[in-house]
Amino acid sequence: MSSDKICNYLGCNTEVDFFNSKKCKFCHNMYCFDHIQLENHECGKTIHVKYLRKNWLRKYELNISSGQYKVVCDQCGYQSGFSLIDFAGKERETHIQTHSCDGSKVFLEGVE
């Protein structure tokens, strides 16, 4: 029996089915076993986690994949509106590029 689905990792042509794949619990896409690990498919829901302000992360417990986050720049004082982590992460990157702010001073913070 042939599967009509392929691994969602760009460039991977492996056919996926119940026996040789898994659904990512964060982005909900299907990946073959070679690409299911977050770092192997650059999961959009977790790639920006490293920019969460560490003291905020310890203080509040929030589901990273469904929580709401804002961009906070300690250099220029910018604060964005709240959005999902993948959108907030992209907004962080855009802010750094357009305002020439130091990336080590631009964080993501969640709803308290």
Image (cartoon, rainbow, N blue to C red):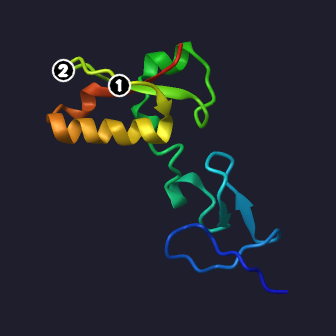
Left or right of 107? Residue 5 is: right
> Circle 1: is it few (<14), some (14-19), or many (20+) Cα within 10 Å?
some
Which residue is at 44% across, 40% downward? 87
- Looking at the picture, does residue 41 appear above or below residue 50? below
Q: How far across and down, in percent of the image, does residue 56 sit?
A: 47, 17
> Circle 2: is it few (<14), some (14-19), or many (20+) Cα within 10 Å?
few
Which residue is at 23% across, 17% downward? 77
Left or right of 69? Residue 91 is: left
Q: How far across and down, in percent of the image, does residue 35 sit?
A: 59, 64
Which residue is at 20% across, 42% downward? 97
In depth, the one of 106 and 50 nearer the eye is 106
Task: From the image, tell me which residue sits under label 2.
Answer: 76
Say what secondary structure mark 1 lies in: loop
Three-letter amino acid code at disc 2? Answer: Cys
- Which dot marks residue 80? 1
Name the image quarter holding residue 18: bottom right
Left or right of 31? Residue 110 is: left
In depth, the one of 62 and 83 nearer the eye is 83
- Looking at the picture, does residue 75 appear above or below residue 38? above
Q: How far across and down, in percent of the image, does residue 84 sit?
A: 51, 35
* Quadrant (top left, top right, bottom left, bottom right) of the N terminus: bottom right
Which residue is at 61% across, 34% downward? 66
Q: Distance of mark 1 from mark 2, alpha carbons? A: 12 Å
Three-letter amino acid code at disc 1? Answer: Ser
